[in-house]
Every structure is written in C-alpha cells, then in structure tokens.
Amino acid sequence: MTYRTLILAAMLSSSALTIAQTPPAAPPIAREQRSSGETPTPQESAQKFVQEKRSEQARYIEELRSQGIAYGQVKSLVNKFRNTFKANKRATQAGLADEINDIFLEDVAIELAVLGFGPSDLRDDVQAKRLFDAAVNKRRGVATADDLTLLAQEVVVGRAVEIAFTNATGPSPAFLVLKVERVLKGALSPERLIRIPLSSSRVGDNLYERNSEETLPPLGSSVRAYLSQSASRFSDRKGRKFTEADVYQKIADLQIVN
Amino acid sequence: MKIFSSLVKYSTAITLMVSSSIAAAQVTLTNKWDSEERQVIVDSHLPIGCDNATLNARDTLRQVNPAMNILFTWAALPDAGPDNTTAVNRASFGYGTAVVLGQTNSTASGPGFYQTYGSFVDADILMNHDMIYWPVTTDTSKTYDLWCDSGEVAFTSTQTDYQSVFLHELGHLVGFKHRTDATSGTCMMHQNSRRGLYNRSLCPDEQSALQNAY
C-alpha cells in the first residue's frame, strides 16, 4: 500500500475509531523488543521501585527532622491504620507486599507531616482517621474537595494576576501571583497578593519548561486554590524551598472557577 | 527524549526547530519535530507487563500517521537527573505527565508559558510509579492504580488504563495541548483520565491535526 492509501484508510475509519474505541486495520508494524540486558523480572522492577522510594522518603524524613518535626510520632500514629491495605497483584507477584505497604504508609505519614500536621492532630482516633483517609486519597489522586479542605491550611478563591519570576532573564522558578478575593479557610485576607510556585519554569532566556499536566490559569481568571505554607518549606521536585511570607504551595492542581 | 518510571526528570536538549501552529476548534498541536523519526528511551524499570501498552500507544499514533516513527529503546535511567531533584512536588502529579521544553519567539510579550512555542526542544514523559505499585484498600473494588493489560488482573472500574495515559502523554510529546471542549471524554487529549474506561484512540480532529503536522 502506498503512503497516500495508508492515510486514506486511516481517515475513512476515523468515525468507527471514535465509536468502537478500536484502532483501524493497518499493515503490521514491526515492533522492537527489549534487549535481553534490559529485561528485569517483575520482582526486579518492584525492587527498583522500593529502592527509589526509600531513597526519596529518606530525604524527606531528614528534612522533617532537621526542622524539628516529631516525624517518628506521626509515623507511629499513622501505623494504627496499617491493616487497611492489601497488596496489589504486582507487589504480591514480586513478594514485596509488606515492604510496599510500609512504603505507602510512610508516604501518607510524610504527606501529613509536610502539610503541617503533628502528633497532637492524630491523637484523637476519629480525627486521625479523617486525616489519614484524606491523605490516602490525595496520594492516590482521588481526593475530594472535602479531603483537600481538611488537608490545606488555606483555601481561597482569587484572581490570577501575573506570572512572576525571581530574575528578569535567565533560569528562574515561576510563580502564579494570585489576588485573594474570598477566603474559605485560613488566615489570609481579601486583597492580599500571594505567590504560588509552579512546577513549570523558565530555564533560559525565552526557553520554558512546561509541565503539561499543570493547570496554568489564564491571567484574569478566577481560581480556587488549596494551599499550604508549611509544604512550601520542603523541597519540591526541583529541590526548591520557599520561606518568603507571601509564598504558599498548592497541594492540588489549581481549579479555574470561571 | 526519555520516559521515566520515577518522579525524577532528566532532560537533554535535542533539536531546535521552527514550527507553525496548527489549531483546530478544540485541539491544538503547536509544536512539531523536524523529522518523522524520534528515538525515545524508556526506563527499563517500568514493569515488563506494561511493555505492550507502551508499544500499543505508540502504534496508535503511527496508524493515524505512518510517517511518524517513534523508536523505543529500553535502558536503565539514572535515579537523579542533572538538576539533582531531591523530592517530589507532592502537590499535583497524577498518573503521568509530559514535561515540554520550548523556545518562544524572542519578540513575543508575556510569559512564555502562554505562548505558542516557536521551537520545540525536548520533551520527557514521567509515569507515576507510585500508581503502578500502590496497595489497594481492603475493599478491593477500590484500587485506583495504573492498570497495564498484562493479564495480571482484570480491569476494574476504579483503575486507570496505563495505555490511555501513555497515549495522552505521547500526544503532548508530539506537540498537542489539552482539548478545550471538555476536561473529560473519549478523545486522546482530554485533560482528565477516566477510571474504568479506555481512551485509546484519537478523535477525528486530533487525527487530522496529526496528519497535517507530519
């Protein structure tokens, strides 16, 4: 089949593609396979995951302890809910069920500690379970508005004013400047200007790194933000921490409200 | 370009080129590569059970436009990238993300993020390995993990299809932005994934944009 015929076949079948959710008939495409040297067993892949997560978590725990946070107590209180989980199939096949369960609980404990919750917040069993469930949902990407409100220190609706950088040119983190209009939780006040760090950034003159899944609200739009100033003081993916009084880290993607 | 199973980004500038923006009513493909062939390194620590989903997603694009030739090689990628990332931005990292490096027109005004990139330099895909391995609750109907069609378990209504997510991120990698008609739906570039459902194909306007671009 010629190139043009291939394209025509794809276009003719496009409506069927949409309805039936199956790809159109096409000539077989040669598929590359992994080389034998790059074919870890399921257990090796899972062990690599465990190794990377432990390394990442160790860095966070070190940061928590360096800031004087009683992380050990937070972790032991979170461990009360250990029996809430069962291993998924991949972990079971790899024989790492208990290890991965522990890693997940560690993630939840770190999440709560980074967001500013301490032992006193977790002593009441009912409150502790609510916080635990909210943190679990957040780590799974299924947090509800109630979960995020519980976990956030500040919940505001504001107007996206500008994208600000710390330098006029060259590499710089980017911040969304938000003018607070309504305060749904916390101590911020209307008219206050705050800066929210973005994971997207400027990496050089006219050169930008854009996280495709990070919502960038159009300037002038109204935005709901779930924020934590506590979280802003811990390293983000780029190893950046922010201690300025006007900086608040978002704990979930920004939501455009109009 | 690289695809990571971890939450660490490692990018290398590959190519500088100029592209024209191709905009449809609801789908935008603002960048394109300078050739139809791209070598993409896949982190070998992504579970082998997800290989078919990775290849199937790539093949979906190639079936729409056979001129596109994305060649995968597997290699063990380093734990830390050159920017020495130390931790995760725990605010918002879902099932996957594509990080795109773009060059704006030097005479353009306003923040570069909001502009059509004049040059497309590099793109990496990060698949959230947490979502691949996380335990389920004792209520096994609530799994919420990334599901690869590897025969391990049946697809449930609370899981998210890896192939659909990977196809979406490949869409960013070849230059697509999110659709503007809705945040969720059956098309490749809808912003939100749908648990328990597949998004393994391109809608007609996405197919046209891809065929016109390359």
Image: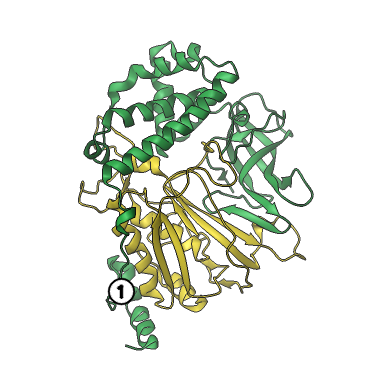
B177 or B68, nearer to the observer? B68
A68 or B104, nearer to the observer? A68
The amino acid sitting under disc 1 is: Ile
Q: Give the vertical position of A211 relative to B24 (above or below).
A: above
Q: Give the vertical position of A256 relative to A252 (above or below).
A: below
Question: Chain B hue?
Answer: yellow
Chain letter corresponding to the colour green: A
Does residue A143 appear in the picture of this structure? no
**Looking at the picture, how far across and down is residue A32, in whole percent?**
32, 66
Kindly identify the residue that appears in the image at 35 percent across and 26 percent down.
Answer: A102
**Looking at the picture, how far across and down is residue B140, in whole percent?**
23, 35
Does residue A203 appear in the picture of this structure? yes
Report in which chain the residue with disc 1 lies.
A
A254 or A69, nearer to the observer? A69
Q: Is B153 placed left or right of B72 in the picture?
A: left
- Residue to which mark 1 is pinned: A29
